[in-house]
Amino acid sequence: MKKNEIKRILKKAKQEGLKTLDESISKSILSLFGVSVVDEIEVADIDSLKQVAKKWGYPLVLKGISKDIPHKSEMGLVLTNLYNLEDLKKAFNSLESKKDLGIEKIIAQPQIKGSREFVVGMFKDPDFGPVVMFGLGGIFTEAIGDFALRVCPITLDEAIRCVNEIRSKALLGNFRGERAVSIEKLARILVALSDLALDFEDIKEIDINPVKITPEGDVVAVDALIGIEQDPNFKVYPDRVDPKNLRKFFYPKSVVFIGASSKLGKWGHRLPTNVISGGYDGEIYLVNKRGGEAFGKKMYSSLDQLPDSIDLAVVIIPARFVIDLIPKLAKKNIHHMLLITSGFAEAGEEGKKLQQRLVQVAKENNVFIVGPNTMGLCNPHANFHCIGTLIFPKPGTTAMVSQSGNVGVQLLSFATDQGIGIRGFCGSGNEAMICIEDYLEAFYEDDLTSTVMLYVESVKNGRRFFELAKKVSKKKPIILLKGGETEAGVKAASTHTGAMATNVKVFNAMCRQAGILKVDAPTDLLDLAASFSSLPLPKGNRVVIITLGGGWGVITADLCARYGLELSKIPQELIELINEKLPDFWSKTNPIDLVGNWDIELPKTILEKVLSWDGCDAVINLGILGRKYSMKRYAASIEKCDPTYSKEFLDNTKEMVEAYERDFLNVCAKMMDKYEKPIFGVRLNTEPDDKTVYEVQGSKYKTVCYNSPEDAVKACAKMYEYFMWLSRS
């Protein structure tokens, strides 16, 4: 019944050309969805004012209602603190005198007591659709900007987390003699707005400001506004591409390079060079309209001379020739194109039109396109490295997609240098046909992918991205770096809620809901990929720090507090065990200070004692690795100034320290196998050939060692964040 009534109201409003519903109608709709709203009565004269005063007592509020004035307070149409009949008369006469503003009626309300005000709202984001918001309300809503967002639909649990996310959450508890707020009641308003937005596409925005909290902790909506979508703009999304159609891009048994070249430096030469030198063992064909030879192979002058059913066409010809090529590919039963060529949507309006035509013709011919304007892709598991830079990452479990080719290949290069194994990489380019959402769906189904790493500037279908990300995150972590984050994109809106929203804030909220681990820098992206591809998840946020020096431990302890990690309190029985291994002046607390002790067995012994204790969820070790570099420099200095020690002795000493570090790397991996708790290493010193990830033969896990305490702490905190998301989902 309530849905039919709301449909009737919305239909009538649209017929009248209204952009917003007035307060009375807005509150009546909200009340049908279970939102507690303040009582109100329309008043027309002094007698009706007396009746209101008799019914509710004082203080009272009078409001002038107009469908053309959404924000009444700013026009002086909300008069509060009316404590007697004389106040009421003056207020009524004041509003009567403003009838030329379009006031259609005057309503009276009891003035809700309470010092706390919040705002609850809903708006439609162009990418992700309906979004609900909760924040500090009243006159401070926009000035302070303390609010949290959630993409719809939301559960009650998600709504409760949203309410608790604001910076001013102390106001939700007992406050200046007033009782704590019913957080569940606030959360149920968010759920109601989510349901309204999804049930009625004509509702564009909802703004409830303020939601007043009574001294008893009850929740009452005092003012409300519903915006109407007069002409819904339905966005056209790319067609879904089945994951099976991505396989031939990464496992081609045969490849043809259209636009191949024998000239050094040209893309038509670089790509075949990388594919051939990378060890690809499939059939390779070269096409150049002038014919000739390259790489010891014949270059064919046309497709007609090639066999049918080649798995993948890598296209490097100018943009203006690509569309005419597509029917020729289809005729040869070639249905997968890696389109390297630029000059499409990234090149302006004409390029956009060309790209639209490209997609249309590709669909007509059942040809699937990665790109255009891409740096290429690679699959180390198939020795297929069709990218513009000479990089041969080792096979692994981290899948990478980047919407920027340059950023992507740089990340791929860094990952290779740091020992991070790659499942596959793709520079997705303009995503004319195959977009980031399609890759997400493929990652979900791919058994070799255990970690997903994304560089994203925009999404084609925000709702699909959101739903797929939630699905993928339940099986494997998604680590994401967002490009183009600015406050631009704030659109004009008739409600506070819509006006406060920006693309980046909505995107961040979506990431939190979907379990996406969003980072702020490329190095963070790689650090997290290293941890997630190598370490067990921490089952809590209790950390033990083992450090070679006290100051470093203090810094790391401060970082743990900043990133939401707790230092475990070392129990007396563990202290007594460590007492047997360290001098009396050791810290006897967490961080565990090894006081510069160079006993090579000591860190391993203490590490195992800590990991075996059930009060520890993760260990950060500082300076245990990297001492070999100090030893090298020390030995070089001794060799120059102290002939007492032979070169052979010094070389043996250096080798002993290096052997210890290799052993410690192995020990860390074996202990993680045994105790299922992560160990984050931080080097004392670094050299250019150091890696972040070290594989240990026969071990389930790998040892990870970072260059700074902050890198280790941030990685641990993000892994715990992901564990907590999994626990809730």
Image (cartoon, rainbow, N blue to C red):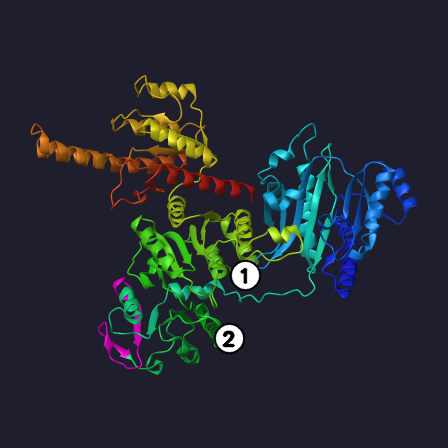
Rendered residue at 36%/29% (across/down): 553
Tell me the number on the disc at residue 360: 2
Q: Amino acid at mark 1?
A: Asn
SS at mark 1 in the image = loop
Front residue of 440 and 588? 588
Residue 277 included in the magenta stretch of the image: yes
Q: Is residue 504 shown above or below 438?
A: above
As drawn, the residue found furthest toward the top would be 584
Closer to the chain start, of discs 2 and 1, is 2
Give the image location of residue 352, x and y in percent.
48, 71
Question: Is disc 2 placed on a helix, strand or loop?
Answer: helix
- What quarter of the picture does the C terminus occupy? top right
Residue 298 can be seen in this image: yes
Q: Which amino acid is tagged 2?
A: Gln
Whole-Å distance between the Cαs marked 2 and 1?
19 Å
Of the pair 297 and 215, the residue shown nearer to us? 215
- Residue displayed at 32% across by 44% down: 692
Relative depth, front residue between 407 and 446: 407
Question: Residue 571 location, x and y as percent?
Answer: 43, 21
Residue 568 on image: x %, y %: 44, 27
Decide which of 647, 551 is in the foreground and name it. Answer: 551
* 660 w.r.t. 478: above or below: above
Proximity of marks 2 and 1: CB atoms separated by less than 8 Å: no
The answer to whether residue 434 is above or below residue 220 is below
Which mark identifies residue 461? 1
Q: Relative to 61, is 246 on the left or the right? A: left
Counting other residues with Cα less than 10 Å from the Cα at mark 1, is it few (<14), some (14-19), or many (20 or more)?
many
- Bounds of the magenta segment: 276-299
